Image: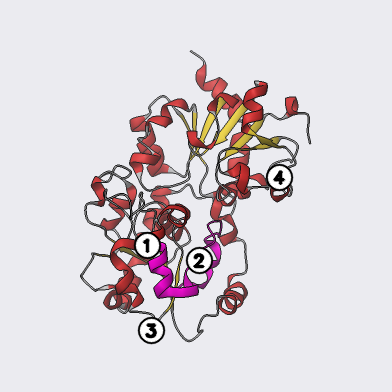
Amino acid sequence: MTDIAKVKFAFGIHEKTMLNHYGAIWKHLNPDEFGIILHGNAISQVSPAQVFNWTRNVYLSPQLVADGVQFDVLITNHSAASPLSLGKINALMNYSAGASNWTVRASYIKDYDVILSYGPALSTLYKQIHPNKIILEIGYPRHDEWFLIDRQPERARLLKDYNLDPNKKTLIWLPTYSGRDFSQDQQATISSLEFYIDEISGLMSQYNILVKPHPLSLRIDKYHVDALCAVFGDRVILNPEADYLPLYLVGDYFLFDYGGPMFGAIYADLDLLLLNVPNAESHPLVGIDSLDVQMRKFFPSVSPNQNKINEMLKEPSIWKAQAGARANIRRSVFAPYYGFSGKIAAECIRNIQAIFRMNSVA
């Protein structure tokens, strides 16, 4: 472990799933120059040995706070990921392009000095709402690997691993978190889980189907996760830390509702169909100007009780027209660092102090 006084910047993580977001950045950093702070759930979910391939500078947030430690730069995806008092400069890592009331408008953003943004569209929103923040565009590091691997052999291997029929098309459903425990809370939702289980399960004879619920749904929304498992069985991915990349490799069509996952598919140039949820734009996490709501203008979508998913999947013109829309959205939402976003992010983080200093001069 490096002398903590020599560790200039650190990443705070509160959930093990954040390893999927940061790993592509950490691989481009010197193991001695940064640290990883385990906070909240991550203290019990992540053992230091699980991150030793990136760095051995692993800390527990309560001890750092007790010791009065401050890093020159602290990188987190929101203020629940680590006490922001641990950073002299706080950098917000953009981790979703959807749900703008949470990712762009939330009150916690006022406590940050620098925002690491996916690209132009989000940067514009941030600038409108937070005009005094320094914004650095880094692309989408999480999906760098998609552009670097030999996909066809990996797809063949994964079809076997998932025990999928190679003669069928594969449908991937990635519903977002409902925002509530259904058995306890009757507030509005943005999750397609509550509206589409019957329609999608009716396609099982025609398609391979894999369902990956949001990690928070697995923890909180037992009602719908149990309903999924009752219908789809072992086709439900119950590991909250499972990454999207294997699903991108085996999938032919992708079903999304709201939040960030649809943008990963756009970034990777995959065919997608959007599942509408009633009044989603009014949900406290979303908002009418949220990019996931706006995507309905550019991509095909269906609504509950229309029973149109199968019809749309079988319409070739939908998928042919969609390719151009994906290219346009990629240009507007993401900085074009395909396969090397993590490297760009690492260099930005290394230089945040200098950038902050130059932008702070009166």
Q: Is residue 237 above or below residue 75?
A: below
* Residue under numbered circle 1: 224
4 and 2 marks in contact (CB < 8 Å):
no
Image coords of residue 190 (percent x, y): 31, 53
Which amino acid is tagged 3? Answer: Gln
Q: How is the image coloured?
A: secondary structure
Nearer the viewer's eye, disc 1 or disc 4? 1
**Residue 70 in view in this figure:** no
Q: Residue drawn 55% across and 33% down?
A: 82
Which secondary structure type mostly characterizes the magenta part of the structure?
A: helix
**Residue 237, disc:** 2
* Residue under numbered circle 4: 48
On the picture, is 104 further left or further right than 297? right
* Residue under numbered circle 3: 206
Segment colored magenta: 225-251
Query: What's the distance in space between the residues labelled 1 and 4, CA to CA?
Result: 33 Å
Image quadrant where residue 2 sits: top right
